[in-house]
Image (cartoon, coloured by chain):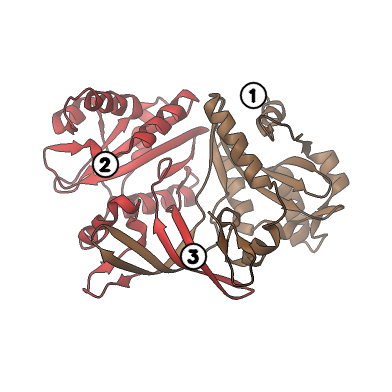
Chain colours: A brown, B red
Amino acid sequence: MKINYPNGKSYTPSTNKGASIAPKIVSHSKRGMRLEDDLNDTNRYYLTHNIAVVHKKPTPIRIVNVRYPSRAQAVITEAYFSQASTTDYNGVYLGKHLDFEAKETTSTSSFPLKNFHEHQVKHMLQVQKQGGIAFVIIRFTSLNANYLLDISQLAFYWQRKLNNGRKSISLSELDSTGHVVNSGYHPRLDYLAIVKTVYNL
Amino acid sequence: MKINYPNGKSYTPSTNKGASIAPKIVSHSKRGMRLEDDLNDTNRYYLTHNIAVVHKKPTPIRIVNVRYPSRAQAVITEAYFSQASTTDYNGVYLGKHLDFEAKETTSTSSFPLKNFHEHQVKHMLQVQKQGGIAFVIIRFTSLNANYLLDISQLAFYWQRKLNNGRKSISLSELDSTGHVVNSGYHPRLDYLAIVKTVYNL
């Protein structure tokens, strides 16, 4: 589905993660293959090959107005993108509950922590506490590099920021505390191979 | 959030599960305490008491038109409720992945299987195959009775329907193959107590 704005730029609904990132929708639309597309494709691969069941949650929408032209159909006439209360992806793999968020940056030196929200970090810590596996997938689009970072590590960098430390994770920090996920063809981003190793499944 | 239609009936967004059930939105709005409210309240209880992390997924919306009055905000001006591809609830409890759907009926004798969709049954079977715990919670609103039914049992009744057998699960069948979940005060519907027993956690 493509939606064109009056300015001629196209809008892709699947990129919406919340009202606050709405401006990104336009700027990202021409980038080509995106992390979310790669993950959706990969999750479809996992599903059809009986490897895992992982789905992206629907984008949360705050509905303000609904018209009811017939008894059979409701038309939403005013709504806004709202902030997700959890992470975008979850599922089950080898009996384990998986919960993760995926973000990309155009930076070539560090990953800005503002890409995550406080409640997402908190949610992932809660999942971990209940015995689930929680992590983030970070992509440096310009470097074509992907990292998997466990929630414990992310929480460390998050706390450092809260303590007025640096507001990002440097590339060398990701090299030492994260795990490289290589891009491939089929599946495009085999992050479960890394999950299996990192979490000893 | 309450939205009033011109006919004076109120609309509660949280009841929308898909375009096909849109007419139910109105008819259910005056029923009072609903299963979904009870589950959301119960899941909040579990979360604050560190018992489990279970969330309801956002309602999937198909976006058709978006206006962009300013660079900071996108307004959805045309959208429709779409059918969920999975179940409404999932999460993690005692290290186990949980995945379930919850439905209510006003019938006093049987639960109509048309309340579930083929792809939901398929999804729950996939979750079970990956070592997750999948079930449905069924409420008979008129009887104030709730049942937890494992996906294996549901799949049995589903297959019977596909084989031109009965299109519903009788109350006595639920009594013998399901598990009663009692309503309470805090939490309102302690389904995890039943999950713990049924699945030997």
Question: In this picture, is A136 found above or below A184?
Answer: below
Q: Which residue is mark 1?
A: A201
Q: Which residue is mark 3?
A: B65
Q: Chain of mark 2?
A: B
Which SS class for mark 1? loop
Q: Quadrant of residue A148?
A: top right
Residue at image coords 52%, 67%? B66
Q: Which residue is mark 2?
A: B115
Front: mark 1 or 2 = 2
Q: Nearer the viewer, residue A184 or B49?
A: A184
Q: Quadrant of the N terminus of chain B?
A: bottom left
Q: Is residue A81 visible?
A: yes
Which SS class for mark 3? strand
User: Picture coordinates of residue A196 (x, y %)?
Assistant: 67, 26
Front: mark 3 or 2 = 3
Characterize the local packing of mark 3: few (<14), some (14-19) or many (20 or more) Cα atoms within 10 angstroms. Answer: some
Residue at image coords 79%, 55%? A106
Q: Quadrant of residue A75?
A: bottom left
Q: Nearer the viewer, residue A18 or A94?
A: A18
User: Picture coordinates of residue B194 (x, y %)?
Assistant: 33, 34
Mark-to-mark CA distance, 3 and 1: 44 Å
Badge 3 and badge 2 both on one subunit? yes
- Total tally of numbered discs in the picture: 3
Three-letter amino acid code of the residue under disc 3: Asn
Compare marks 3 and 2 and give the one earlier in the sequence. 3
Q: Quadrant of the C terminus of chain B?
A: top left
Q: Are marks 3 and 1 in contact (CB under 8 Å)?
A: no
Q: Is residue A128 visible?
A: no
